[in-house]
Amino acid sequence: MKKLVIFFFLFFGTFAFLQAQKGADLSGLWLGKITQDEGGYASDYVFEIYIRQDGSKISGRSYVYVDNIYASFDISGSLHSEVYMDLKDSEILESKVNEGMEWCLKKYQLVFKIKNGVYHLEGFWQGETSFSTCIPGKIFLKKQVPRA
């Protein structure tokens, strides 16, 4: 009986969680950080994504900055389920780097989560410059509530 009760709560808890995510609009401003594994320019960068969701298509713009360097990118991708998306940097729109540096064009694999009523996107990225493969890392974002 105890196992049946545990199964009941796990099954319906998971079902309720997935229903809460179903139909969630991912459009809007997401703020957080992007990390880079050891050997990169910095371990943490400020990261912002403005997402426009049209069905399963995702488009928008991302911004990354640390110290006195920054870049903005056009992004595009697809929502593969209510909880998983692939994105990529399509083009560098604006950037400032130190001499000898180049920004990575990144590919992201993100999972949508709800924690304490707050929407999160979390996952991994990898990328390339014109001359090498970038040191990969992780992404942690929270959806921002629009202000009136």
Image: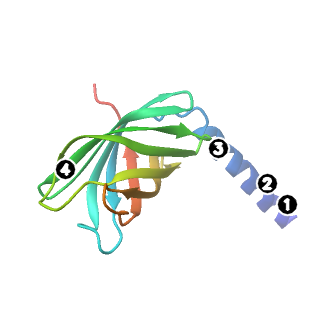
- Mark 2, residue position: 8
* Residue 28 can be seen in this image: no
Helix, strand or loop at label 3? It is: helix
In this rendering, is residue 24 above or below 7? above
What's the CA distance linking mark 4 and mark 2? 49 Å
In this rendering, is residue 101 above or below 54? below
Q: Are marks 4 and 2 in contact (CB under 8 Å)?
A: no
Q: Are marks 2 and 1 in contact (CB under 8 Å)?
A: yes
- Density class for disc 1 (Cα within 10 Å; few <14, some 14-19, many ≥20) is few
Residue 41: mark: none
Query: At which x and y percent is residue 31?
Result: 32, 46
Q: Amino acid at mark 1?
A: Leu
What's the CA distance linking mark 4 and mark 1? 54 Å
Coloring scheme used: rainbow
- Mark 3, residue position: 18
Q: Earlier in the sequence, mark 4 or mark 3?
A: 3
Helix, strand or loop at label 4? It is: strand
In the rendered image, which quarter is residue 134 located in?
bottom left
* Residue 69 can be seen in this image: yes
Residue found at the far front of this picture = 131
Q: Earlier in the sequence, mark 4 or mark 2?
A: 2
Q: Amino acid at mark 4?
A: Tyr
Name the residue at 74% across, 55% down: 9
Helix, strand or loop at label 1? It is: helix
Name the residue at 56% across, 27% down: 55
- Mark 4, residue position: 70
Give the camera-side residue of 64 and 93. Answer: 93
What's the CA distance linking mark 4 and mark 3? 36 Å
Q: Amino acid at mark 3?
A: Leu
Q: Earlier in the sequence, mark 1 or mark 3?
A: 1
Query: At which x and y percent is residue 35?
Result: 34, 62
